[in-house]
Amino acid sequence: QVELVESGGGLVQAGGSLRLSCAASGLGFSKYDMAWFRQAPGKEREFVGFFSRTGTSYYSDPVKGRFTVSRDNARKTVYLQMNSLKPEDTAVYYCATNLRQTYSRRYDYESEYDYWGQGTQVTVSS
């Protein structure tokens, strides 16, 4: 079955960097788009970044210019490089994939993704 496992979260000071990883299994990884979402305490889960199977990437406005999504198809892993971290980036970060390969709305909608990892906590101290 499809499994996504995130790692790399932790505690970091404001201005610091972290790199999250999401290892996939049970799917032909290179065929599918991958996305990152996050959920802060008391808030809804929100879109962070997206890396398509064809190499296109998109980012939410709050992270644009600071975060970078990349993927290594040979390792079946997608990464989220986070630089210049701010306390408001504190959240549980999730990776997700859309096995249908089509979108009824758009890539940044949570409902478009059918497989999710368990999440990894990122805490940014001020």
Image (tube, grey):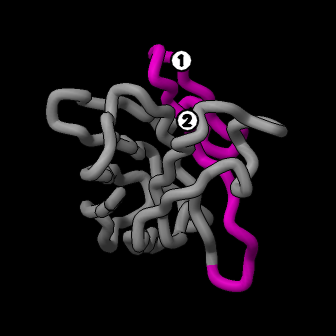
- Quadrant of res 30: top left
Name the spot of residue 108 as percent of width and height, x first. Answer: 71, 42
| Quarter of the image that includes the N terminus | bottom left
**Residue type highlighted by circle 2:** Phe
Image height check: is 74 above or below 97?
A: above
Q: Main secondary structure of the magenta part?
A: loop
Residue 52, magenta (yes or no)? yes
Name the spot of residue 109 as percent of width and height, x first. Answer: 75, 48
Name the spot of residue 117 as percent of width and height, x first. Answer: 41, 65
Question: Left or right: where does residue 59 sit relative to residue 118?
Answer: right
- Quadrant of res 59: top right
Residue at image location 32% in from the left, 66% down from the top: 9
Residue at image location 45% in from the left, 46% down from the top: 84
Image height check: is 9 above or below 32?
A: below
Q: Which residues are magenta?
A: 41-65
Q: Which sits in the foreground, 13 or 88? A: 88
Could you tell me which secondary element the residue under label 1 belongs to? loop
Mark 1 or 2, nearer chain start: 2
Q: Report the Cα–Cα distance between label 1 and label 2.
A: 8 Å
Name the spot of residue 98 as percent of width and height, x first. Answer: 56, 44
Residue furthest toward the left? Answer: 75
The residue indicated by pointer 2 is 50
Residue 16 in sight from this viewpoint = yes
Badge 2 density bin: few <14, some 14–19, many ≥20, Cα 10 Å: many
Residue at image location 44% in from the left, 61% down from the top: 14
Q: Which sits in the foreground, 122 or 34? A: 34
Q: Residue 56 got which mark?
A: 1
Badge 1 density bin: few <14, some 14–19, many ≥20, Cα 10 Å: few
Could you tell me which secondary element the residue under label 2 belongs to? strand
Kindly indicate whether the residue at mark 2 contacts the one at mark 1 (C-beta within 8 angstroms).
Answer: yes
**Residue type highlighted by circle 1:** Thr
